[in-house]
């Protein structure tokens, strides 16, 4: 993250962390077929059991793509998940 921030600052850009949020939200919709909670999608309590499983897998994929290994880090980007 520090390398990324250093490179964007040298390029005259700042506040680029929002790109991670946009990426995570777009990727979530791509993987699940619906918007994430923070973008107006269903809340975790409204997901079916099948949707909860899809939600969990999508979050794990996105977490890894963002350089993490825990679904919980996606809460900041996507809202609360449909944990099973």
Image (cartoon, rainbow, N blue to C red):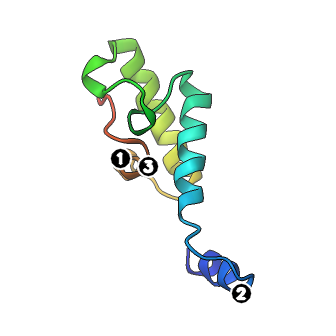
Q: CA distance from mark 1 to mark 3?
A: 5 Å
Query: Which residue position is annotated with label 2?
Result: 10
Query: Residue at position x 45%, y 53% from top?
Result: 69
Callouts 1 and 3 close, C-beta under 8 Å = yes
Numbered disc 2: secondary structure: helix
Residues at marks 2 and 3, CA–CA distance in whole angstroms: 26 Å
Q: Position of residue 59 (x, y in %)?
A: 46, 39
In space, the residues marked 2 and 1 are separated at their CA atoms by: 30 Å
Q: Looking at the image, can residue 75 be seen?
A: yes
Q: What residue is shown with label 1?
A: 75
Q: Is residue 2 left or right of residue 72?
A: right
| Secondary element at image label 3 | helix
Q: Position of residue 70 (x, y in %)?
A: 39, 50
| Residue shown at 60% from the left, 57% from the top | 19
**Whether label 2 touches label 1, CB < 8 Å:** no
**Image position of 34 with respect to 38: above or below:** above
Q: Quadrant of the N terminus?
A: bottom right
Image vertical order of residue 5 relative to residue 60, above or below: below
Image height check: is 25 above or below 6?
above
Residue located 35% across and 41% down the image: 79
User: Which residue is painted at 33% across and 18% down in the image?
Assistant: 47
Q: Badge 1 local density, few (<14 within 10 Å), some, or many (20+)? A: some
Numbered tag placed on residue 77 in the rendering: 3
Give the left or right position of residue 39, taking residue 61 as reference.
Answer: left
Q: Earlier in the sequence, mark 2 or mark 3?
A: 2
Label 2 CA crowd tier, 10 Å (few <14, some 14–19, many 20+):
few
Viewer-proximal residue among 82 and 18:
18
Question: Secondary structure under badge 1?
Answer: helix
Image x and y of residue 84, in percent: 28, 26
Residue 35 image position (x, y, % from top left): 49, 28
**Cβ–Cβ under 8 Å for marks 2 and 3:** no
């Amino acid at each position: 993250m520090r390398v990324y921030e250093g490179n964007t600052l040298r390029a005259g850009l700042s506040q680029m962390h929002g790109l991670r949020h946009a990426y995570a939200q777009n990727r979530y919709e791509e993987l699940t077929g619906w918007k994430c909670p923070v973008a107006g999608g269903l809340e975790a309590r409204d997901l079916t059991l099948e949707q909860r499983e899809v939600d969990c897998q999508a979050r794990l994929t996105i977490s890894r793509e963002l350089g993490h290994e825990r679904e919980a880090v996606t809460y900041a980007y996507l809202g609360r998940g449909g944990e099973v």
